[in-house]
Image: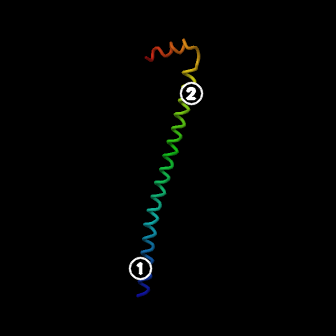
Amino acid sequence: MAEILIWLVAALGAVGGVAFGRVWGRAEGERAGKREAERDAMEETIGRIERGRDALRDGCGAGDPADRLRRNDGRW
């Protein structure tokens, strides 16, 4: 009888370990996905800032004001 009880406890422990491992792995995957999404969003934000700075440098302060007016005239 004791031998059956030992096997039963061992089997329940194995099943519980597998279930716990799956839950733990899912939680780790979600955390990793969230970190990756945050990193991607930060890279995109940095890229937007750099593109904005380039546009500002090339557009607002570049060249003669009369030339800028002629270039922008068609955009209105």
Residue drawn at (58%, 20%) of the image = 61
Q: Residues within 10 Å of mark 1 (few under 14, many from 20)?
A: few
- N-terminal of the pair, mark 2 or mark 1, is 1
The one nearer the camera, 75 or 60, is: 60
Q: Is residue 24 above or below residue 67?
A: below
Q: Which residue is mark 1?
A: 8
Q: Secondary structure at mark 1?
A: helix
Q: Is residue 66 above or below residue 18?
A: above
Residue 74, quarter of picture? top left
Residue 28 as seen in the image, left or right of residue 62: left
**Tags 2 and 1 touching, CB below 8 Å:** no
Q: Nearer the viewer, mark 2 or mark 1?
A: 2
Residue drawn at (45%, 74%) of the image = 13
- Give me the C-alpha separation between circle 2 and circle 1: 69 Å
The one nearer the camera, 11 or 47, is: 47
Q: Position of residue 33 (x, y in %)?
A: 48, 50
Q: Position of residue 60 (x, y in %)?
A: 55, 21
Q: Position of residue 18 (x, y in %)?
A: 45, 67
| Callout count | 2
Residue drawn at (47%, 60%) of the image = 25
Q: Position of residue 75 (x, y in %)?
A: 45, 17
Q: Is residue 6 above or below residue 13?
A: below
Residue drawn at (49%, 42%) of the image = 41
Q: Which residue is mark 2?
A: 54
Q: Amino acid at mark 2?
A: Asp
Q: Amino acid at mark 1?
A: Leu
